[in-house]
Image (spheres, rainbow, N blue to C red):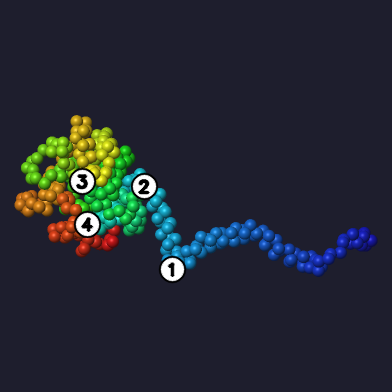
C-alpha cells in the first residue's frame, strides 16, 4: 500500500479541468487529432475554391458569363491548331481539298461546300482561314476543318480584285500548297466562287505532277491537247490559278517554289496592280521542261468567260461540265446575281446540305 501511495504522490496535479479523468481526456483528444490530421486536405480544398472563384468570378459579372469563358477556351485551342495537325485530321486517301477564305467570302464558301457535299467529298475539305473570325466560325460549326496559317490578315479587308489586299490574300496560296505537299499529301485547290456539278477526281487521271485549267474563253476542240498551251501576247500562257491539283512530287514542289519566287519578283504596287495568276503562269512556263503537266478538258472545267457567255457551247457540251468557275466578273453582288440566274446559288434553299449549315 505504501508503495502505491508513493507512486501517486509523484503525479503533478492537472490544471486542465477536462483531464479530471482518463475518459474525458480521451474524448477531448479525438476531435482535435482528427481536425489536425485533415488540416492539409482542408487547406488544399480552400485554396482550390479560391482559385476557381478567382477565374470564374469575372465572368459572372457579365450576362454572357460562362458562355464567354467556354468560347474563349475554344478560340484559344484553335489558335494553336497547326496546318500539319489539320491536314492529318482532315485528309482522306492521302488527299485534301483546300480553299483559302476570309470572312467576306463565307457565303461563297458555304455555296461551294453544298456542291461538294452533293458529290460526297466534303470530308476532305480543309478551309485555310485568312482571319480569326473565319477560323472560329468554321470550327464552331465544323470542328477541325479550318486552320489559320500565321500571320492573320485583317478581317476588314474586302480583297477587291486588283487591290493590295487581294494580292496579299492570293499571294499566300503557293506557300500553303507547298507546305501541304511537303507533308506528303495530294491537294486540290479551289477558289470558292466555284460550283461542282460532278466529281472532278476521275479527271485527275495518270500520275502527272500538276493539273490545271485554261482561263481563255475561246472554244477548244473536244479532243484538245493536254499539254501546257503556248504563250500568249504577254509572253506567258493564260492558265487559271484558281483550280489546281497537285501530287507531292519534286515537280509539283518545284512549280510552287518558282511561283513564290515570281510573286516576290513582281510585288503589288499602285502602278502595277498585280495578282497571283501571272506569277503562276511564269512559273509553269519556266519549269515546263522539268515538270509533268496536264491541262484538264475545257468541256469539264470551263472558265466563266465561256460558260456564262456562250450559250451555244453550253448546249453542245451539256452533261460534260464538272466545275463551273464564276470568274470574268468582279464584285460579290454581281457574282451572286449571276449564280442565281443560272440556278447555281445554292445557299438560299439548300443551306442544310452544307457542313456549316446556314451562316
* Real-space Cα separation, disc 4 to disc 3, in angstroms: 19 Å
User: Which residue is identified by label 3?
Assistant: 243
User: Which residue is identified by label 4?
Assistant: 332
Specify the farthest residue to the top: 289
* Real-space Cα separation, disc 4 to disc 2, in angstroms: 25 Å
Residue at the location (18% across, 36% down)? 293
Mark linked to residue 63 = 1
Task: Residue 316: give x, y in percent of width and height.
Answer: 5, 50
Q: Residues within 10 Å of mark 4 (few under 14, many from 20)?
A: some
- Earlier in the chain: of badge 1 and badge 2, it is 1
* Real-space Cα separation, disc 2 to disc 3, in angstroms: 24 Å
* Real-space Cα separation, disc 1 to disc 2, in angstroms: 33 Å
Specify the farthest residue to the right: 2
- Earlier in the chain: of badge 1 and badge 4, it is 1
- Viewer-nearest of discs 1 and 2: 2
Q: Is residue 115 above or below residue 59?
A: above
Does dot 4 land on a helix, a strand or a loop? helix
* Real-space Cα separation, disc 1 to disc 3, in angstroms: 46 Å
Q: Is residue 296 left or right of residue 46?
A: left
User: Which residue is identified by label 2?
Assistant: 151
Amino acid at each position: 500500500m505504501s508503495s502505491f501511495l508513493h507512486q501517486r504522490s509523484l503525479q503533478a496535479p492537472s490544471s486542465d479541468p477536462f483531464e479530471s479523468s482518463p475518459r474525458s481526456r480521451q474524448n477531448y483528444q479525438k476531435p482535435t487529432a482528427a481536425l489536425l490530421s485533415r488540416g492539409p486536405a482542408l487547406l488544399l480544398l480552400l485554396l482550390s475554391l479560391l482559385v476557381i472563384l478567382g477565374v470564374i468570378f469575372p465572368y459572372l459579372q457579365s450576362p454572357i458569363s460562362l458562355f464567354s469563358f467556354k468560347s474563349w477556351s475554344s478560340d484559344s485551342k484553335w489558335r494553336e491548331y497547326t496546318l500539319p495537325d489539320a491536314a492529318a485530321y482532315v485528309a482522306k486517301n492521302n488527299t485534301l481539298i483546300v480553299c483559302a477564305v476570309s470572312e467576306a467570302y463565307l457565303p461563297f464558301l458555304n455555296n461551294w461546300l453544298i456542291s461538294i457535299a452533293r458529290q460526297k467529298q466534303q470530308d476532305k475539305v480543309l478551309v485555310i482561314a485568312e482571319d480569326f473570325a473565319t477560323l472560329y466560325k468554321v470550327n464552331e460549326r465544323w470542328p477541325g476543318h479550318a486552320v489559320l496559317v500565321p500571320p492573320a490578315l485583317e478581317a476588314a479587308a474586302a480583297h477587291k480584285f486588283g487591290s493590295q489586299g487581294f494580292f496579299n490574300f492570293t499571294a499566300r496560296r503557293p506557300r500553303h500548297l507547298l507546305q501541304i505537299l511537303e507533308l506528303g499529301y495530294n491537294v486540290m485547290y479551289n477558289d470558292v466562287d466555284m460550283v461542282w456539278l460532278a466529281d472532278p477526281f476521275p479527271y485527275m487521271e495518270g500520275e502527272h505532277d500538276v493539273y490545271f485549267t485554261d482561263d481563255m474563253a475561246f472554244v477548244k476542240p473536244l479532243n484538245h491537247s493536254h499539254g501546257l498551251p503556248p504563250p500568249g501576247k504577254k509572253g506567258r500562257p493564260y492558265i487559271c490559278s484558281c483550280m489546281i491539283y497537285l501530287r507531292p512530287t519534286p515537280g509539283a514542289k518545284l512549280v510552287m517554289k518558282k511561283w513564290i519566287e515570281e510573286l516576290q519578283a513582281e510585288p503589288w504596287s499602285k502602278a502595277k496592280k498585280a495578282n497571283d495568276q501571272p506569277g503562276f503562269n511564269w512559273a509553269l512556263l519556266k519549269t515546263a521542261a522539268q515538270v509533268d503537266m496536264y491541262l484538264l478538258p475545257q468541256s469539264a472545267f470551263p472558265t466563266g468567260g465561256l460558260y456564262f457567255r456562250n450559250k451555244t457551247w453550253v448546249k453542245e457540251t451539256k452533261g460534260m461540265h464538272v466545275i463551273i468557275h464564276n470568274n470574268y466578273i468582279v464584285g460579290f453582288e454581281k457574282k451572286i446575281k449571276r449564280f442565281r440566274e443560272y440556278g447555281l446559288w445554292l445557299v438560299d434553299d439548300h443551306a442544310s446540305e452544307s457542313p456549316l449549315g446556314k451562316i
